[in-house]
Amino acid sequence: MAHTHDGIDWTERIVALRRADSLDAEFNRAVAERLVDSLTPGGSPPVVVDIGSGAGGMSAAFAAALASRGGGRVVLADAVEELLTVAVEHTRGVAGDTVQVEGVQVDAADENLPDLLPAADLVWASRVVHHLPDQQKAIDRLARLLAPGGWLAMSEGGLATRCLPWDLGIGEPGLGSRLTAARDTWFERMRAEMPGSVRLPIGWTSALAVAGLSDTRSFSFVVDHPAPASEPVRQSVVDWLVWMSGVGEDGLSESDREVVQRLLDPDDEAYVGARDDVFVLGASTVHLGRRA
Ligand SMILES: C[S@@+](CC[C@H](N)C(=O)[O-])C[C@H]1O[C@@H](n2cnc3c(N)ncnc32)[C@H](O)[C@@H]1O
């Protein structure tokens, strides 16, 4: 297992991350285009660095946005080699001739990060900073990757994703809310138990300002795949339930755990992947700051 600070086996998550990227491609595309359009045109083609690039969905969206605007360079940076390989391959598949794509295996908590990556017009870091021990230091470091006038954009927080009807017909109603609460308890523990963990007692835009960035702001976007659910949406709900019940296992009652087991069993009549009344509804927030 690659070295990360969170004790999570990210290699195991490749298939689910790839499926989520594929399902959310249109939302990723809109965010990538918005951010690329906010870059100040300069002499050389823009450089985008994607920190914690996962399965590469946003890198691919950046590559496509840059390709349709004259070209550029996308650098994917992740701690997990297996993910990086998949993500680079996926991004190259949409980049065309005008966009250069490369992957760099890094630990985003490494003090030498700015020596390992090029100066960037846009640094994108989605759902990775909260996996690092000292989040303020991590943001300070990401800010140091910026070329003058460059933007740091972090996707963190938003609204918890909802996927299930309130009453599933088995177990107690409200399972989705209990899964969210159990996941939040796990999250708190994951952060507390991370070696060298430091609390971040301020909001994300304040942390960007502490890192010396200006023009700080946020925007949120909704991810909405309503019922009746298509096959990819049902599969995504299965992926969500596997993740939520896995990390939240300790916080669920015995009866909820039994219900989850039935919902995840393709041979059970209660299998969640066979229901068309499931859905994916969530919102993500992007926090931005600019280097003067
Ligand atoms: C929740 S996933 C987010 C993936 C993608 N950015 C997204 O939003 O879908 C977290 C990613 O951060 C990577 N990661 C975790 N710890 C890291 C570290 N210390 N340095 C670099 N990447 C890390 C994981 O390998 C994984 O790809």
Image: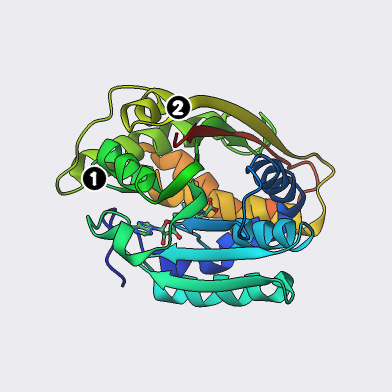
Work out whether mark 2 precedes mark 1 in sequence or the reverse, and give the earlier one.
1
Q: Is 196 left or right of 93, judged from the image as shown?
A: left
x, y (%) of residue 240? 57, 50
x, y (%) of residue 198? 19, 36
x, y (%) of residue 154? 49, 40
Front-most of 198 and 163? 198
Q: Quadrant of the N terminus?
A: bottom left
Give the label on residue 193, or none. Answer: none
- The answer to whether residue 76 shows anywhere in this view is yes
Q: Quadrant of the C terminus?
A: top left
Crowd band around label 2 with a 10 angstrom C-alpha radius: few (<14), some (14–19), many (20+): some
What kind of element bears circle 1?
A: loop
Looking at the rendering, the quadrant in which ligand 1 lies is bottom left
Front-most of 45 and 38? 45
x, y (%) of residue 89? 60, 77
In this figure, what is the number of numbered marks?
2
Crowd band around label 1 with a 10 angstrom C-alpha radius: few (<14), some (14–19), many (20+): many
> Rounded to the nearest whole Å, what is the CA distance between mark 2 and mark 1?
24 Å
Q: Is 68 left or right of 123, judged from the image as shown?
A: right
Residue type at mark 1? Answer: Pro
Residue at 34% x, 40% y: name it.
139
Residue at 44% x, 37% y: name it.
291
Quadrant location of residue 208? top left
Q: Is residue 68 above or below residue 32?
A: below
**Cβ of disc 1 within 8 Å of ligand 1?**
no
Quadrant location of residue 284? top right
- Contact, mark 2 vs mark 1 (Cβ under 8 Å): no
- The answer to whether residue 55 shows anywhere in this view is no
Give the label on residue 214, or none. Answer: 2
Residue at 64% x, 43% y: name it.
35
Residue under label 1? 133
Front-most of 182 and 157? 157
